[in-house]
Image (cartoon, rainbow, N blue to C red):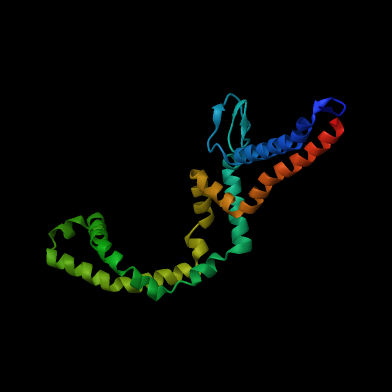
Amino acid sequence: MSYGVGGYPLWQYITIPFISGIVGWGTNVIALQMVFYPLEFFGIELFRIKDQPWGLFGWQGIIPTKAHKMASDCFELMMTKLIDIKEIFGRLKPDEFSKSMEQGVLLLMDSIINETANEYMPYVWKRLPNAVKDEIVVLADHESPKFLTAFMTDMQENVHEVMDLKFMCVTECVQNKQLLINIFKEVGEKEFIFIKHSGFYFGFLFGLLQMIIIF
């Protein structure tokens, strides 16, 4: 039996909202994927405007394309609104830090002293008895806790001068774009799920409207 102005079967009218909803959901899913992927430009890059995801024939994810700017903005937001790096480093206890590093420093001390001595006084170092060399290593190891404690204390007070955290974070995100994408996905997980689902909901509503008009 035919219905409506077009004279189509009833089931065809009923499917309009569902098909419209599926199309809306699918386009939103594809759009989100195109925000993240591909990590590098895919296609034939005959012509491409700098920092734009599209080329003449091809595409690169929006976030990977703007990885440097995205990472820089994220860092600024976290450092100004969420995290105080100096306060975090201030939680570290210099004495406990030096104790935890004792074993590692002992393993490295011999090679560090040998390398340094061979660089600055190779003639003298080669002629020293092994017993003397070992004694120097032992004395340096005994003094290392004081150095590590002072080092950590100084670092806590001057963390921004000692470490360029922004450069480190931005460089890592630019070199490892998947890391930046994972950050966005984790932070915006609920919003991305809503965007996917909203494609179906709005598509379904528009489909209902279309069905009413056609019917």
Q: Is residue 34 above or below residue 142?
A: above
Q: Nearer the viewer, residue 34 or 161?
A: 34
- State the quadrant of the C terminus: top right
Above or below, 198 relative to 1: below
Q: Residue visible at 55% across and 46% down?
A: 181
- Answer left or right for 44 relative to 205: left
Is 4 on the left-hand or right-hand side of 141?
right
Closer to the camera, 175 or 20? Answer: 20
Residue 28 image-quadrant placement: top right
Residue drawn where x is 86% and y is 33% of the image: 213
Picture layout, residue 107 above or below residue 90: above
| Residue 91 coordinates in the image, percent (x, y) | 49, 72
In percent of the image, x 25 and y 63: which residue is there? 107
> Measured from the top left, where is residue 195 in percent x and y?
68, 46
- The front one of 11 and 173 is 11
Picture quadrant where residue 6 is located? top right
Give the position of the N terminus as an image quadrant.
Answer: top right
Q: Is residue 61 visible?
A: yes
Q: Percent position (x, y) of residue 95?
A: 38, 75
